[in-house]
Structures are given as C-alpha cells and as structure tokens.
Amino acid sequence: MSLYGLQKFLFEINREPSVQQAFRESPQALLDRYSLTVEERHAIESHDIGLIYVLGANGQLLMHFAAYLGMPWADYIAAMRTGIAKHGPVRAGVYAMTTRMDEKVAGV
C-alpha cells in the first residue's frame, strides 16, 4: 500500500491552490503525479471518504479534503463510519484498528 502517496496528495490538495485547480481540471492527470494503488486512486476519483479513511489516511488531512469537496462535517463523520462498515477496519496508519468491530460492538 502506498499510504505515503495518498497522504502526500491530501496534504498538497489541502494547501496548494494550484493542486486544487489541477484536480478540478483533470483529476486523472493530477493523480498520475502520485504513487497510488489502484484502490487509492479509485477512492480519490470517486470521492469515497470512507474508503480513503479505511486505507489509512490521516483524519486531519482527510477532513480538509472532505471540506474541499463540499462535504458537511456530519456527513464526513458518517462517511468514515460507513467506510468501516462497508470496507472493514482501518488497514494502516495511526488509525489502524487492532480489534475487530464485532468485539467493539459486543463490548469485549
């Protein structure tokens, strides 16, 4: 997994107006600049905040990307929860889940 490439994209799009403009004009061309897996690229192109979260993106970077996309805060939080329900536990990064969701729900 190329978590570094994913987070580098998020960092740059959050801070650089030129990267934001490039993303609006040609997301595919912009994403070619980053070392991304097919799954990471698809998640970005489809604006799938939940999947980006599950792939291990830092929440601080991700929340600004969600805001850039026009996503309200409540929808951002819901998207992360939906991502876990749909794609499984967070796979990498500081949010990687070390317990199974069924254990958390059962209170184990």
Image (cartoon, helix red, strand yellow):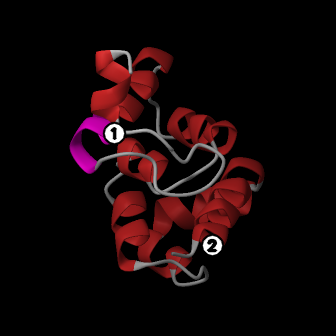
Label at residue 9: none
28 horizontally vs 98: left or right? left
Mark 1 element type:
helix
Q: Nearer the viewer, residue 96 or 82?
A: 96
- Image quadrant where residue 18 sits: bottom right
Marks 2, 1: nearer the viewer? 1
**Residue depicted at x 37% and y 50%:** 51
Q: Residue at x 38, y 21 (%)?
A: 108
Q: Up-down: is 76 above or below 64?
A: above
Of the two numbered discs 2 and 1 on the same chain, state the one appearing first in sequence.
2
The one nearer the camera, 21 or 92, is: 92
Question: Is residue 86 a member of the stretch shown in magenta?
Answer: yes
Query: Magenta segment, which residues?
Result: 82-87
Measured as percent of width and height from the top left, residue 17 is found at 72, 54
The vertical placement of 26 against 19, above or below, is: below
Kindly identify which numbered label has been placed on residue 84: 1
Check if residue 8 falls in the magenta segment.
no
Give the percent coordinates (x, y) of residue 32: 52, 84
Examine the image and state in which quarter residue 2 appears: bottom right
Task: Residue 61: give x, y in percent of width and height.
Answer: 67, 44
The type of residue carrying mark 2 is Gly
Say what amino acid the circle numbered 1 marks: Ile
Give the residue at mark 2.
5
Q: Position of residue 63 (x, y in %)?
A: 59, 34
Q: Identify the main secondary structure in magenta.
A: helix
**Label 1 environment density (alpha carbons within 10 Å; few <14, some 14–19, many ≥20):** some
Q: Residue at x 46, y 20 (%)?
A: 72
